[in-house]
Image (cartoon, rainbow, N blue to C red):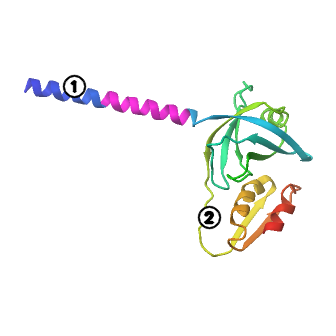
Amino acid sequence: MKGHSKMLMITVSILAVGLLGCLIIWGAIVYFGDSQSLSVKCIENPSDDIHLIHLTKPKNMTWKAGSYAKIALPNIKESGQKNRWLTIASNPGDNEILILTHNNGSLYKKTLTSLPAGSKVEMSWLTSNLSVANDKEPLVCFASDIGIAAMKPIVKEWAGKRSIVLSRLDKGVLVFDKELFQIA
């Protein structure tokens, strides 16, 4: 009986160490979020506080239309200003990653919108919560302000495949209007 108890204790200990190791690995993956370093190609300022950030796209990177990612600025040390969740306004087949944003005056946005070409940003947690059913019903898209960034790749992806109704609240963000209304 004593040998059986000892063997059980060893087995439980091995399982506990294995579980702890798995949790540590999972935690590291969650914490770092599969981060990739991207270069700023250029930044456009089409109007007022609206900025288009053009980033290099790694060859192996893909995403769904309407995705967003966590973009971190490595040189910011101030807590709460190091990263933001930003929508990707380009399609996976494009040769760049395009981000549309306001420069609202925060340290993060001021820094992001003034980065020179060649600067590095870290992208992680590339994901999407927008899904479109693959059917023949009209695709109705509502957007306001820079929310149009999420709709642009979806409209481009489904153009010609089904009817698209694009409705948006005009808050002065007209950067994709001509392109989208020609498609839709």
Q: Report the residue marked by disc 2.
A: 132
- The residue positioned 16% from the left and 26% from the top of the image is 7
Query: Residue 102, percent across and down?
Result: 83, 45
Q: Is residue 109 above or below residue 141?
A: above
Along the polypeptide, which appears first: circle 1 or circle 2? 1
Magenta region includes residue 19: yes
Q: Which one is nearer the viewer's eye here, 2 or 174? A: 174
Q: From which residue to which does the magenta span run?
A: 16-31
The mark tally for this picture is 2
- The residue positioned 74% from the left and 25% from the top of the image is 75
Magenta region includes residue 107: no
- The residue positioned 44% from the left and 30% from the top of the image is 24
Amino acid type assigned to the residue bearing label 2 in the image: Val
Query: Residue 162, percent across and down?
Result: 68, 73
Image quarter hosting the N terminus: top left
Displayed quadrant of residue 153: bottom right
Amino acid type assigned to the residue bearing label 1 in the image: Ile
Labels 1, 2: front one: 2
Query: Residue 53, percent across and down?
Result: 80, 42
- The residue positioned 80% from the left and 32% from the top of the image is 107
Q: Is residue 103 above or below residue 167?
A: above
The reply, left or right, for residue 70 in relation to residue 40 is left
Q: Report the residue marked by disc 1.
A: 10
Displayed quadrant of residue 84: top right
Q: Residues within 10 Å of mark 1 (few under 14, many from 20)?
A: few
Displayed quadrant of residue 31: top right
